[in-house]
């Protein structure tokens, strides 16, 4: 934990990339390697200082990733990180050998990869090949930067280089950090995203339109540039029909693919920037935002081309508000397993990477293309005067002639549209040959392999795992000692398998477990070793990351932290929040004997996270009284409690019912203004109300007695108990503890955030127990539990953040 500036979770796409990196350590798919050629006089020292300043300015460039011994991986921002900046001099090497030497250098660089736990996940090499010519090799990991960041980095680098060259003041850093995007992600409505994508992908039946692999994968690419006249015509047609050039190119690519599937309902993969427009400053942020999403394209043959393209564009715009979801979730919502992927092809549109110029520095792209893990990728690069079509393909599925033929068909279709815009979709599609261009691709013969001996499962855990592996991998005969990844499991399948295992065995598993135990036998042993309950942890890390002192919030009367997870949406992303849950209820596990004992346990856990004060504590309902006792114990230990927040919590001796004599006086005063008939009606209504509540309470008491009997029998026999019954047990037990609590006045202030219940005293009786000031924060709701739910939780979170800020002043 030394040299740590910040810690926060991964985005869904980052988590998938991390799993892919762990499962395919030799893959270069996530390795960004760009080569530029720099011409002109170069101040090498100033150039190196500019790169180092760049790393010092941006947290994402000082970020590493940690996952071992954690239930969820996190990204750790180092306070400082040393950039690896190599310098080589090849001027003595013959010019004819420079490119060969460069290719060898690039291959070695890719083979090195990155150690993900060490920052920065980026390095630079400067290779001088002439007095005024250098190669610049810039390598980074996709976990920290996507291709949209490249021009942002290079433009800032140019400004920093200019400042270093002339001794000018370094321009201020105005970019928002990547952690603000992570905080934005955590506030998004997953239920709304699920509803949208389930509707979009309902009854989707993706079929493979690509040939099967014939041998080991090897990524290659082919290129084709559209003529300037064609590009100009397509740009004009797009503008006339209120379309983007992106949509036009995507639509034509869709029609090329559709001819191989003979279907008018096609799911394509589309790379999106992933930068939410509602997050201010997102367009200049550095980080890994991109996502690969399914786009379902449907049409009728008699649809007008421009009408259909407009529908396609509207669909893309509708998806933008939910483009942050993970591929794993999409696969689940489409009700498909991992062996039937939503899409096998990918389309992306982007401006080509531009040169960076600063005084005598002139950086121009020299090498470095896209790499993806999809068998077929079309990148349409808008270079202004023309559009470059870049087709990446898996050489195990396509040969060079096939790739060339695919580009020829797409180019021909675009040229035809540019010359004759009045088309129906069907007529335009029929311009494309219907045959599959890879028929000529010969499949190399493979040696017959002797099947390995299948080790059968030997216990129930292995049998349950075998069923899950079969679902994910689509294989029935799986050896207990077969490696998941050698059986064809990839990153998406790994995440799906972990999710299924967690559901089957009702326990959380860290993402790296499958890499440490990649066989059914090893994984079963790992699960078996963890069957015994681990020591109880009271603290629930709801939002553990952040640079501010943590806020500890004690559970409600039922012992859980239900609803607390909604609060961080309205807290500062740098504000850590821990819930405190109640133990008890397991075989051999005793419930706390008193509120004082409960508070001592919680204080011990709190101090393990934050050894010294000042502390910020809070509690909801019954938890407010426990937090009140914790604050006093910390004070007696010589620690400072900066803030005590009581969330709809009544004081230790508070009674919601007025004394009987006082209630009788109120009834008499009301009846004094009534006539005889009104008095009789009033009395009858009060009697009926009393009968109703007495009957209701007796029914509930009988139900509770049955549940408590089930609870005690099951806990004695070591059988599981439902969360609802355990919550009822905690409610009854904590009510008993409250009757025995010997409360003492508290030397300090408190914040009372209370619901709108006009019949109760405004301070809930706390002024008798808080020696200094009780600050009231009323909420406009009479729903006690509803304070933790939308939309009321927004006001709760804003109250908390306001006073957490004041507590630090």
Image (cartoon, helix red, strand yellow):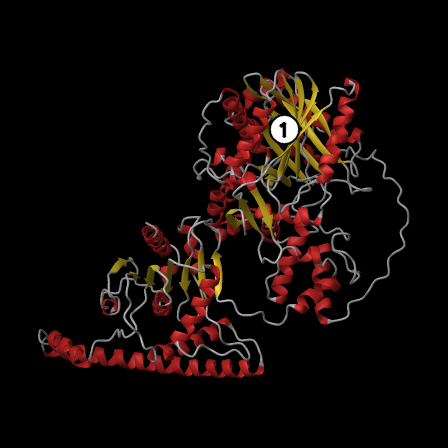
Answer left or right for 509 relative to 323.
right
Please name the residue that numbered disc 1 is placed on: 380
- Look at the image and tell me whether residue 328 can be seen: yes
Q: Residue at x 47, y 36 (%)?
A: 282
Q: Quadrant of residue 218?
A: top right
In depth, the one of 568 and 691 nearer the eye is 568
Residue 176 location (% of width, % of height): 46, 38
Mark 1 Cα-neighbour bin, 10 Å: few <14, some 14–19, many ≥20: many
- Reply above or below: 742 against 805: below
Picture mark count: 1
Residue that sits furthest to the front in the current view = 638
For the point 40% across and 68% down, the residue is 556
Q: Position of residue 526 (x, y in %)?
A: 68, 65
Query: Residue 808, image x and y in percent?
Result: 35, 51
Question: Horizontal and vertical percent for residue 767?
Answer: 23, 67
In the rendered image, the vertical position of residue 453 relative to residue 397, given as above or below? below
Question: Is residue 758 rendered to the left or right of residue 129?
Answer: left
Q: SS of the residue at dot 1?
A: strand
Asked if residue 658 is positioned above or below residue 179 in the image, the reply reads below
Q: Is residue 337 visible?
A: no
Judge left or right: residue 16 versus residue 557. right
In terms of depth relative to the viewer, which is nearer, 153 or 475? Answer: 153
Front in this rendered view, residue 84 or 196: 84
Q: Residue at x 68, y 29 (%)?
A: 368
Q: Residue 598 vs residue 464: left or right? A: left
Q: Nearer the viewer, residue 635 or 430?
A: 635
| Residue appearing at x 59%, y 45% in the figure | 64
């Amino acid at each position: 934990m030394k040299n740590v500036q910040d810690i926060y979770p991964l985005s869904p796409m980052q988590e998938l990339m991390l799993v892919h990196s762990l499962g395919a350590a030799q893959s270069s798919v996530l390795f960004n390697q760009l080569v530029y050629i720099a011409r002109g006089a170069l101040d090498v020292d100033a150039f190196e200082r500019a790169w180092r300043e760049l790393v010092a300015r941006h947290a994402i460039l000082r970020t590493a990733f940690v996952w071992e011994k954690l239930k969820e991986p996190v990204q750790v921002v180092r306070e400082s990180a040393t950039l690896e900046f190599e310098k080589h001099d090849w001027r003595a090497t013959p010019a004819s050998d420079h490119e060969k030497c460069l290719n060898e250098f690039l291959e070695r660089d890719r083979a090195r990869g990155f150690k993900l736990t060490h920052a920065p996940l980026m390095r630079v090499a400067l290779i001088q090949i002439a007095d005024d010519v250098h190669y610049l090799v810039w390598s980074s990991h996709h976990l920290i930067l996507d291709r949209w960041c490249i021009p942002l980095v290079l433009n800032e680098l140019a400004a920093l280089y200019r400042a270093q060259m002339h001794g000018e003041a370094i321009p201020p850093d105005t970019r928002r950090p990547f952690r603000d995007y992570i905080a934005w992600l955590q506030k998004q409505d997953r239920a709304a995203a699920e509803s949208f994508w389930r509707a979009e992908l309902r009854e989707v039946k993706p079929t493979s339109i690509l040939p099967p692999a014939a041998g080991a994968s090897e990524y290659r690419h082919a290129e084709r540039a559209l003529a300037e006249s064609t590009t100009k015509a397509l740009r004009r047609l797009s503008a006339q029909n209120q379309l983007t050039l992106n949509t036009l190119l995507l639509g034509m690519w869709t029609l090329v693919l559709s001819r191989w599937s003979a279907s008018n309902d096609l799911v394509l993969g589309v790379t999106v920037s992933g930068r939410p427009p509602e997050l201010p400053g997102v367009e200049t942020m550095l980080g890994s935002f991109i996502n690969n999403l399914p786009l379902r394209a449907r049409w009728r043959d008699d649809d007008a081309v421009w009408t259909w393209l407009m529908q396609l564009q509207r669909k893309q715009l509708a998806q933008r508000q939910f483009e942050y979801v993970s591929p794993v979730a999409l696969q689940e919502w489409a009700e498909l397993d991992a062996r039937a992927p939503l899409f096998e092809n990918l389309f992306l549109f982007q401006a080509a990477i531009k040169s960076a110029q600063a005084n005598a520095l002139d950086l121009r792209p020299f090498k470095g293309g896209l790499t993806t893990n999809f068998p077929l990728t079309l990148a349409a690069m808008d270079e202004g005067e023309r559009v470059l079509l870049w087709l990446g393909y898996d050489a195990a599925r396509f040969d060079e002639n096939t790739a060339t033929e695919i580009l020829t068909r797409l180019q021909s279709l675009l040229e035809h549209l540019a010359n004759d815009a009045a088309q129906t979709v069907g007529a335009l599609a029929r311009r494309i040959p219907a045959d599959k261009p890879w028929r000529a691709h010969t499949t190399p013969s493979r040696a017959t392999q002797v099947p390995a001996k299948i080790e059968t499962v030997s216990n129930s855990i292995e049998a349950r795992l075998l069923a899950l592996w079969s679902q994910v991998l689509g294989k029935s005969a799986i050896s207990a000692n077969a490696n998941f990844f050698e059986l064809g499991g990839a990153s998406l399948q790994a995440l799906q398998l972990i999710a299924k295992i967690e559901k089957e065995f009702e326990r959380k598993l860290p993402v790296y477990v499958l890499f440490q135990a990649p066989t059914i036998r090893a994984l079963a042993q790992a699960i078996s070793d963890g069957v015994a309950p681990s020591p109880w942890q009271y603290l629930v890390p709801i939002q553990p990351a952040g640079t501010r002192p943590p806020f500890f919030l004690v559970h409600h009367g039922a012992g859980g932290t239900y609803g607390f997870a909604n609060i961080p949406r309205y807290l500062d992303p740098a504000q850590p929040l821990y819930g405190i849950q109640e133990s008890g209820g397991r075989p051999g596990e005793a419930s706390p004997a008193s509120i004082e004992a409960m508070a001592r346990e919680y204080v011990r856990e709190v101090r393990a996270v934050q050894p010294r004060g000042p502390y910020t504590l809070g509690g909801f309902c019954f938890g407010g009284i426990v937090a009140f006792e914790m604050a006093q114990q910390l004070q007696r230990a010589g620690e400072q409690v900066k803030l005590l927040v009581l969330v709809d919590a009544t004081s230790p001796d508070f009674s919601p019912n007025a004394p009987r004599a006082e209630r009788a006086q109120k009834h008499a005063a009301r009846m004094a203004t009534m006539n005889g008939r009104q008095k009789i009606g009033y009395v009858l209504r009060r009697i009926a109300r009393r009968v109703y509540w007495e009957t209701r309470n007796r029914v509930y008491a009988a139900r509770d007695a049955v549940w408590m009997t089930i609870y005690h029998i099951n806990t004695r026999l070591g059988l599981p108990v439902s969360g609802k019954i355990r919550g009822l047990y905690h409610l009854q037990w904590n009510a008993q503890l409250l009757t025995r609590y010997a409360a003492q006045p508290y030397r300090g202030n408190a914040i009372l955030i209370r619901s709108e219940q006009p019949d109760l005293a405004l301070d809930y009786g706390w002024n008798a127990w808080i020696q200094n000031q009780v600050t009231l924060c009323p909420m406009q709701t009479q729903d006690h539990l509803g304070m933790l739910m939308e939309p009321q939780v927004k006001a709760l979170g804003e109250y908390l953040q306001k006073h957490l800020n004041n507590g630090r002043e």
